[in-house]
Image: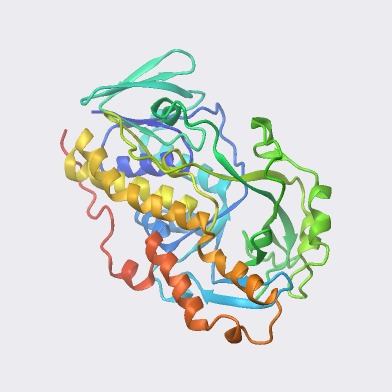
Amino acid sequence: MTILVAGGGIAGLVLGLTLHQLGLPFRVFERVAEPKPLGVGINLQPNAVRELIDLGLEAQLDEIGVRTRQYGFYTKSGREIWVEPRGHAAGYSWPQFSLHRGKLQMLLLEELRQRAGADAVVTGAGVVEFETTDHGATLTLADGRRVEGRVAIAADGIHSAIRRQMVPDEGEPIWNGAIMWRGTSPGRHFLGGDAMFLAGHDSQRFVAYPLTPEDPATGLATINWIAELRVDPARAMAKGDWNRPADKADFLPAFEGWDFGWVDCPGLIRSSGLVYEYPMVDREPLPAWTDGCVTLMGDAAHATYPVGSNGATQAIIDARKLGAAFRDHGVTRDALLAYEAEMRPRAEGILRANRGKGPDAVMQMVEDRCGGVFDDIESIIPRAELAAHAEHYKQLSGFSIDTLNAQPPIIGPMQPVSA
């Protein structure tokens, strides 16, 4: 009844930890021979943090990240549109975290190997194709090896080989004409500390948040930032352009005037090390995730724009929901279908909301109504309307405060399930 997991990123590793907690045999197959802490900053919403705490990882999260206290939207000149508390400061029973994606992946990998054994994750073992019936699945690895299991889970990301086999005519992810440049820089916290901000509008915005506390000796923290511009959508975005090192001269001039006093955006860009370029992409929602005894999760299932600080969160929730389905239905195709029936409509709703800019849409609303210039935001958009807009996205994404605080845990008591 082994569960085969293709991909050792955040989704696959949290699934592995969940399956180990449930006493279910599994094996994770990761393409990279030696995983390294690559990537940039991400945010984990309280519904995902709750699940990681249930996995016994709270202390480790505090070692590698920051408990986010505040989240806010601002105009291109730094005027405040909407600011709200986050995590414990907002009344959640669990914190929100800002941290480095690579450090989180390494934490999950180390924990999984410690708990389930070094052979729980097979590296240098990319999955290239699958075979399936209603009662089992076989994965073929890049070196030709074949592994058999009761079910197989595709956690192999936006370029998933398993999804490509399920949907052979889909092609590359869909680019919306925006490019994000991402980096980290030494700097001080802003807006009272442990805060995240987004400034600008649809065609140009800047996002920043700290990944570490301020160092007592230097006063400096590691600040994660994203500079985004909309460019000519006819520009070719070849496969080699994905996640590639970029030249700051390509975008820094557009942000030269974005020193708001409380944060110096061009200063952060200048003081950063290597900068990476990412096209803003997603994929069309699928009518089904499951083929026989194989299903999709995380970005393989529902790659979406990085709007609403919600991508890694949804991958973690997928993993826990899959675990709950195995607990309730056994390691069967029925479990995969139950998981899909619950999570696919939610994921599609988030994907479509993010195409509409999700909670970030308020920045363009203000830009459209007043060019981002006002004395009192109430005269442009009533604060009650801003609050309702923010709450709608939380409800859609599963982290509305009152709802989440009242919900039972996804997994509950960690009892092994029978074959």
x 74%, y 59%: residue: 186
Say how many tags the image has: 0
Name the spot of residue 144 as percent of width and height, x first. 45, 12
Could you say which quadrant of the image residue 49 lies in?
bottom left
Residue found farthest to the left = 418
Q: Is residue 81 visible?
A: yes
x 44%, y 58%: residue: 58
Could you say which quadrant of the image residue 131 lies in?
top left
x 49%, y 27%: residue: 123
Q: Please, is residue 119 above or below residue 377 in the view? A: above
Name the spot of residue 87 as percent of width and height, x first. 46, 69
Locate the C terminus and report the quarter of the image it occupies: top left
Locate the N terminus and report the quarter of the image it occupies: top left
Q: Using the image as rendered, state which of residue 148 and residue 342 is in the foreground.
A: 342
Q: Is 333 left, or right, of 239 in this rendering? A: left
Residue found farthest to the top = 144
Q: Please, is residue 172 above or below residue 251 in the view? A: above
Q: Using the image as rendered, state which of residue 175 and residue 86 is in the foreground.
A: 175
Q: Please, is residue 137 above or below residue 356 in the view? A: above
Name the spot of residue 245 as percent of width and height, x first. 73, 40
x 35%, y 53%: residue: 346
Name the spot of residue 200 as percent of width and height, x first. 68, 66
Q: Which coloring applies here?
A: rainbow
Q: Is residue 331 visible?
A: no
Q: Is 327 left, or right, of 166 in this rendering? A: left
Q: Using the image as rendered, state which of residue 163 and residue 124 is in the foreground.
A: 163
Q: Is 131 left, or right, of 231 in this rendering? A: left
